[in-house]
């Protein structure tokens, strides 16, 4: 009887080892596949952030620049007396105002803030593109980890390759090597 217990023990041990190897291979593949899906979702989220943020920032900067341009133009015209000059007498008065304007040339004009808005937009553009690039890099790392796992010797014996197919890394779309243009 002792020999039969030993044989059943060895067979049971082998079955247990095979089951644990299968369990480990399958569970690992599921975990890596879920991690891969999460990384791709993060890439998509970064794309959506860009799609939501950039057009609004561009509109804001355009509006601020137009507003400052209008204000600066009105202030400059008012100081030079150009706005109301219609007759020769007005031109003579305007000449005096120009001399006065030369004297007060060093007065403070409205402070221009749109340049700061453009710098802020540039910073947001760069930050957004860096986020997208970082998420793509994480995605490619997750692909490598996943593919390495599913192509392992023991894992290949235990998992279904249709359920866990090999994945391709992130590939840029045609024309992506060209930087997008932002028009003002």
Image: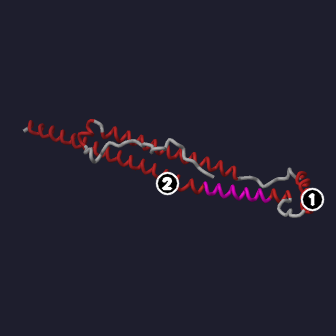
The structure residue drawn at horizontal position 49% and vertical position 51%, both measured from the top left corner, is 47
Give the answer, above or below, for where 86 lies relative to 149.
below
Q: Residue at x 63, y 57 (%)?
A: 60
Q: Residue 93 location, x and y as percent?
A: 92, 60
Say the numbered circle drawn on residue 48.
2
Q: Position of residue 7 (x, y in %)?
A: 11, 37
Dividing the picture into quadrants, the one containing residue 82 is bottom right
Q: Which residue is mark 1?
A: 92
Mark number for residue 47?
none
Q: Callout 1: 10 Å neighbours few (<14), some, many (20+)?
A: few
| Label 2 crowd bin: few (<14), some (14–19), many (20+), radius 10 Å | few
- Residue 123: x %, y % from top left: 61, 47
Element on which disc 2 rests: helix
At horizontal 50% and vertical 43% (from top left) the residue drawn is: 133
* Of the pair 159 and 61, the residue shown nearer to us: 61
The part of the chain drawn in magenta is 58-74
Q: Earlier in the sequence, mark 1 or mark 2?
A: 2
- State whether residue 10 is above or below residue 181: above
Instruction: Please name the residue shown 32% across and 39% down the image.
Output: 149
Return the x and y of residue 76 as percentages of the image width and height.
81, 56
Specify whether 151 is left or right of 10: right
> Which residue ends up furthest to the left in the rendered image?
1
């Amino acid at each position: 009887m002792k020999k039969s217990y030993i044989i059943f023990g060895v067979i049971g041990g082998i079955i247990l080892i095979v089951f644990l190897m299968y369990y480990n291979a399958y569970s690992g593949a599921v975990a890596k596949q879920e991690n891969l899906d999460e990384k791709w979702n993060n890439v998509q989220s970064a794309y959506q952030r860009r799609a939501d943020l950039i057009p609004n920032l561009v509109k804001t900067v355009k509006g601020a620049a137009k507003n400052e341009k209008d204000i600066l133009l009105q202030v400059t015209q008012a100081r030079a007396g150009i706005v109301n000059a219609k007759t020769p007498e007005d031109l003579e008065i305007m000449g005096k105002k120009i001399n006065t304007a030369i004297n007060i040339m060093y007065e403070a004009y409205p402070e221009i803030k749109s340049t700061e808005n453009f710098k802020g937009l540039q910073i947001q553009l760069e930050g957004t593109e860096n986020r997208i690039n970082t998420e793509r890099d994480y995605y490619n790392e997750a692909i490598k980890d996943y593919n390495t796992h599913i192509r392992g010797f023991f894992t290949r014996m235990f998992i279904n390759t249709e359920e866990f197919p090999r994945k391709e890394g992130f590939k840029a779309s045609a024309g992506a090597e060209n930087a997008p243009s932002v028009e003002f």
